[in-house]
């Protein structure tokens, strides 16, 4: 008998028929002799609808009350799913994050998990029932409800899998696994059978939507095997496992595992900065004070103006206003002559463990984009990733071109079973 944690996303439980289909899968897993704990997201676009509703009421909803509102979506889906599983002849009990013992810090809207005390979940499993936990939420030291931010249900599932020493954490979504690119813009994207945590982290950090970055970090830290599958089919899906398989995988698989894209970033350029060691540290300390998360950085000496340099970096668009305001407030102190902002940019990234042992990857990437006339604005690299900033209207063509250039196109068209992409 194995303990399996299953997570079902919003598109998997979007309506009553979908909930009944998911309940059958859960019941089947239980009948096979497994102990089952389920983490569920809100139905369909419920969370977005609740955010829209709050914005109709006030321009500045209090963060504490906002978390209380947003957790309602998962509470609805967990209760309905427990009813549906029970209707399949399998006893099931629903629990909020608070009831399940998920403890967080005090940051409303973006809480971090401090620990899990899964006593009620363990008792439910021991009694032979299925425990269904509301994802995305927990409770802080003030006994207030908190939310974990976007993708928090993935993180909830992996955290419970780690706490319960589960054999595997199954992440059910609206595609058949992890693909070599987003099948919504690259129909020829192929499914990847096996990936390492390292590769998945790079893809998740640079726009891939199948798994949330924090969930993969948690899985890597506690060595939780992840199995990404579709709740709409019985295909094998993608296994995400320990990085120590990367050498073996690099010999068996293509150099590049996937192409990710990101439209959520903006670019800030600070012009005419004093070309001294302390300048950059002061600038990025100011960015940090505004809670800015920097992805890419390029610094160059202003040849036309000796003693000055220019620094460009990217931040999430949601953080743009706060970061720019902080820089403007300290402009004189920082010695900045000008602040330039590009609100919308596109980032295309290639990721693959095989890049460590293969030459010519950069040349092939730049040649492919040059052939279609795409200009590159910024470049950032790691051992297994190259990211490029391009014009937003060239992003999708760039992704498809690079995908083809590295031989990742599949003969069959990828299937997206559900979801609105919202």
Image (spheres, rainbow, N blue to C red):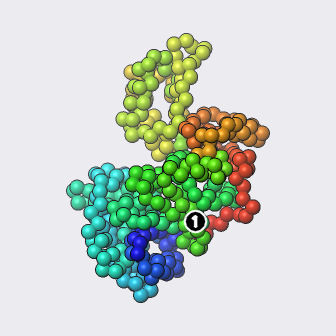
Give coordinates of residue 266: x percent, y percent: 54, 40
Residue sitting at 60 percent across and 60 percent down? 193
Q: Residues within 10 Å of mark 1 (few under 14, many from 20)?
A: many
Q: Which residue is mark 1?
A: 237
Left or right of 50 on screen, residue 405: right
Residue sitting at 47 percent across and 38 percent down? 294
Residue sitting at 57 percent across and 36 percent down? 381
Left or right of 201 on screen, residue 77: left
Count of marks, rendered view: 1
Q: What is the quadrant of residue 51 in the picture? A: bottom left
Give coordinates of residue 309: x percent, y percent: 53, 20
Q: Is residue 279 above or below residue 358?
A: above
SS at mark 1 in the image:
loop
350 vs 322, nearest the viewer: 350
Left or right of 257 on screen, residue 44: left
Q: Residue furthest right?
A: 371
| Quadrant (top left, top right, bottom left, bottom right) of the C terminus | bottom right
Residue sitting at 65 percent across and 52 percent down? 253
Q: Is residue 343 above or below residue 412?
A: above
Q: What is the quadrant of residue 67 in the picture? A: bottom left
Q: Residue furthest left?
A: 142
Q: Is residue 351 above or below residue 154?
A: above
Give coordinates of residue 300: x percent, y percent: 56, 22
Q: Is residue 156 above or below residue 357?
A: below
Left or right of 200 on screen, residue 161: left
């Amino acid at each position: 008998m194995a303990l399996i944690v299953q997570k079902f996303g919003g598109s998997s439980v979007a309506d009553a028929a979908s909930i009944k289909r998911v309940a059958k899968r859960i019941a089947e897993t239980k009948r096979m002799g497994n102990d089952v704990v389920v983490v569920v997201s809100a139905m369909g676009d419920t969370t977005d609808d609740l955010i829209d509703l709050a914005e109709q009421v006030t321009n500045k909803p209090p963060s504490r009350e906002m978390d209380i509102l947003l957790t309602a979506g998962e509470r609805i889906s967990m209760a309905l799913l427990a009813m549906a599983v029970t209707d399949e002849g399998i006893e099931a009990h629903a629990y909020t994050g608070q009831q399940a013992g998920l403890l967080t810090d005090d940051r409303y809207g973006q809480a971090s998990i401090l620990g899990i005390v899964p006593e009620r979940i363990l008792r439910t499993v021991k009694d032979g029932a299925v425990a269904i936990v509301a994802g995305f939420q927990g409770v802080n030291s003030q006994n207030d409800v908190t939310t974990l931010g976007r993708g928090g249900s993935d993180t909830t599932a992996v955290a419970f899998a780690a706490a319960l020493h589960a054999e595997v954490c199954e992440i059910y979504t609206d595609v058949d696994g992890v693909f070599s690119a987003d099948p919504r813009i690259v129909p020829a994207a192929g499914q990847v059978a096996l990936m390492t945590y390292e590769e998945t982290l790079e893809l998740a950090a640079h726009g891939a939507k199948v798994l949330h970055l924090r969930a993969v970090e948690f899985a890597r830290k506690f060595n939780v095997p992840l199995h990404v599958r579709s709740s709409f089919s019985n295909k094998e899906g993608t296994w995400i496992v320990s990085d120590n398989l990367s050498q073996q995988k690099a010999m068996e698989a293509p150099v590049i595992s996937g192409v990710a894209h990101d439209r959520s970033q903006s670019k800030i350029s600070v012009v005419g900065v004093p070309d001294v060691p302390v300048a950059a540290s002061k600038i990025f300390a100011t960015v940090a004070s505004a809670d800015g998360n920097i992805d890419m950085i390029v610094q160059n000496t202003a040849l036309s103006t000796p003693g000055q340099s220019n620094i460009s970096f990217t931040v999430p668009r949601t953080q743009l206003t706060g970061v720019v305001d902080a820089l403007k407030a300290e402009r004189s102190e920082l010695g900045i002559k000008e602040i330039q902002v590009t609100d919308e940019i596109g980032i295309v990234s290639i990721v693959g463990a095989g890049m460590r042992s293969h030459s010519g990857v950069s040349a092939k990437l730049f040649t492919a984009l040059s052939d279609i006339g795409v200009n590159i604005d910024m470049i950032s690299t790691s051992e297994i990733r190259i990211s490029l900033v391009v014009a937003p209207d060239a992003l999708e063509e760039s992704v498809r071109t690079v995908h083809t250039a590295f031989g990742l196109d599949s003969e069959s068209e990828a299937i997206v079973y559900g979801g609105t992409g919202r």
